[in-house]
Image (cartoon, rainbow, N blue to C red):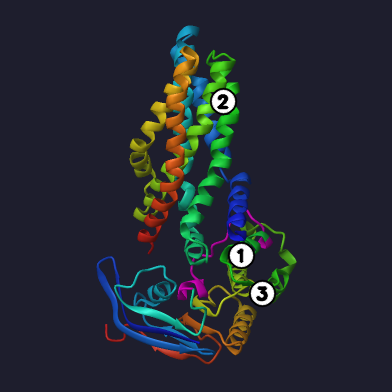
Amino acid sequence: MTALIALLRRDIQVALRVGGGALIGVLFFLIVVVLMPFAVGPDLALLKKLGPAILWLGALLASLLTLDRLFAADHDDGSLDLLTMSRTPLELICLTKAVAHWLVAGLPLIVATPILGLLLNLDGDATLAVALTLLAGTPALTFTGMIGAALAVALRRGGLLLAVLVLPLSIPVLIFGVAASNAAVIEPAGFGAPFSILCALSLAGLVIGPLAAAASLRHGLD
Amino acid sequence: MRLTGSQLRCVRGGREIFAGLDFTADAGEALAVVGANGAGKTSLLRLIAGLIAPAGGSVTFVGGDDDLSPAEQAHYLGHRDALKSALSVMENLAFWRAALGGEATNIDAALNAVGLDHIAQLPAAFLSAGQRRRLSIARLLAVKRPIWLLDEPTSSLDANGQAMMADLMRSHLSGGGVIVAATHLPLGIPARELRIGATA
């Protein structure tokens, strides 16, 4: 347990300090969402309709952007070798790294959502719904992305490969995330079902992600 | 305590590096793995460390903790130093002491032993190659593990550093530890030679 807490602390510290890149994801999210009204034009009704989809797409791409360094950095400096030799199961190490990544890269996206919602002409309820669905859905993106990050380490230099591998897995999250946010705006009764599925995807990712990532890292050791 | 490798076979990238390799190292004994570049010295160390799966044979460690694999009772000092540039010397060492698990010792004493105590708060980004090496070596002292797997342990160390490393290895051996070191340079301690790739 001490080992996992130490790992969580280290990953967060490294990400938050100079050159750690914790803000890259949220900056990218900001860029995508800020540019969108300029591309779509000043049609407020259209922006409001597209708003949840734009926010979700921005969050998805932002989390993909930062995920590829999840294991690669530790692999490059040899930390991954030593973590493998520690007395903590590799599955728990993967889980901890994913949690640390979500805290520094996923959580800021959710915090930024209410501000960015203003730019897309979303009212309070819609913004809250998007933030809530992101809170439920981004863990699924992190956990599925982690599988891709582990595979990319095993296959060496798989930055783009990560996106290709992870994208199909993140499509269900995107569909149900946007469906739940839209339902909250248009017809509140339809919110429950897609939101439950979103939570289920995150919980399934929580179980499968660390197992698959650890298996892939073990297989890819060299 | 005895570390044994029997009939080890290693294949990297479809090419057989070595096969039928046997070795034993008893408590208090150092094994110096020698051989030409590409003979498989590093591969042998990584194989013992559990970082490469052997294509044949096995590594066993008798007399240690039976619940743990040989890799979990070993320190691996490789070419890559596993240091995070953004963290200070102290933070790096404290992290590995907590993460590796096992009997932890005093962290200041470990830094003192490798001569880095005066820059404990300096970010690792500003360390020289030799200082990074010293910090990696401090990891071996911060957590007690009976097997030391050292890959070119004295590389980039100055004369003082090499003498210091020899002292540390001597005290590890006198405490009943086992050392397997891959090296081209003299280790500075009496060691049994294990030559690999001699026939190739």
Q: Position of residue A63 (x, y in %)?
A: 48, 37
Tell me how far mark 2 sits from mark 3, CA to CA: 49 Å
The residue pinned by badge 1 equals B128
The residue type indicated by label 1 comes to Ser
Q: Nearer the viewer, residue B124 or B126?
A: B124
Q: Position of residue A49 (x, y in %)?
A: 45, 13
The residue pinned by badge 3 equals B114
B19 left or right of A204 in image: left
Q: Is residue B120 magenta?
A: no
Residue A118 seen by the camera:
yes
Instruction: Tell which circle, 1 or 3, labels the residue nearer the N-terminal end.
Output: 3
Q: Residue at x 60, y 89 (%)?
A: B174
Q: Secondary structure at mark 1?
A: loop
Which numbered marker is on residue A113? 2
Chain name for mark 1 = B
Q: Which residues are magenta?
A: B68-90
Q: Secondary structure at mark 3?
A: loop
